[in-house]
Image (cartoon, grey):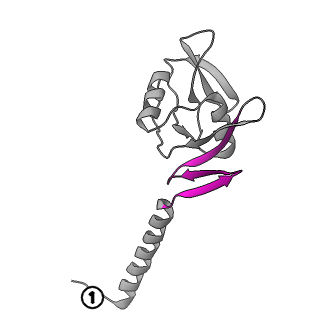
Amino acid sequence: MSLITIETIEAKQTELGALIQKFKEQSQVKVIKIEGRTIELRPGECYAGAKLDEHGNHLHDVIVLAARSEESYTFDGAQQWAKAAGGDAPSPEECALIKANCPGLITRWTWTNKTHEENASYAWCFTSNGTAGRPKSAEGGALAVRRS
């Protein structure tokens, strides 16, 4: 059995204090107030921004959920994953907000929630260059958002 010293105890106490502080920080709900609106972010969520209509009127705020997946999904699989995570897949416009305001969350092409207008076997995905149509059977990334 090794000897326990005050230095060993103090080192463990410092380590424990740092863990407690990290836990407290990740458990706090962040609050954003914008023009009379209050947006609460749960731990791990990212505020992507406000979706506006063609006249600049506020429609809703877009929040990326904390759930992350490194797996690849077909279009239908991405929609199901987003629902299982507690949200919805983002629209193409919401993906643009996410790319602009939540750096690092879109690192590969990612499915949106929108089927291609002219070909139902295709859907819109978001790439580093914007939106593109892909066959729904292709496998890409998935995100989950909530709207408030």
Q: Kindly indicate the quadrant of the structure image that contains residue 16.
A: bottom left
- Whether 32 is drawn above or below 125: the answer is below
Q: Residue furthest left?
A: 1
Give residue 59's position: percent from left, percent from top: 66, 35
Q: Residue furthest right?
A: 55
Give residue 9's position: percent from left, percent from top: 36, 84
> Which three-letter amino acid code belongs to the residue tagged 1?
Leu
- Whether 13 is drawn above or below 111: the answer is below
- Whether 32 is drawn above or below 1: the answer is above
For disc 1, the marked residue is 3
Neighbour tally class for label 1: few under 14, some 14-19, many 20 plus, Cα within 10 Å: few
Horizontal relation, residue 99 to residue 71: left or right? right
Q: Kindly indicate the quadrant of the structure image that contains residue 111.
A: top right
Residue 22 covered by magenta stretch: no
Magenta residues: mostly which secondary structure? Answer: strand
Give residue 125's position: percent from left, percent from top: 60, 25
What residue do we see at 44% from left, 79% from top? 14
What residue do we see at 50% from left, 61% from top? 28
Q: Secondary structure at mark 1?
A: loop
Horizontal relation, residue 80 to residue 109: left or right? left
What residue do we see at 61% from left, 52% from top? 38
Q: Quadrant of the C terminus?
A: top right
Number of numbered callouts drawn = 1
- Whether 14 is drawn above or below 58: the answer is below
What residue do we see at 69% from left, 29% from top? 130
Q: Which segment did they paint magenta?
A: 28-52
Q: Residue furthest front?
A: 36
Quick one: 66 or 18, which is closer to the camera?
66
Q: Quadrant of the N terminus?
A: bottom left
Residue 42 covered by magenta stretch: yes
Give residue 107's position: percent from left, percent from top: 59, 39
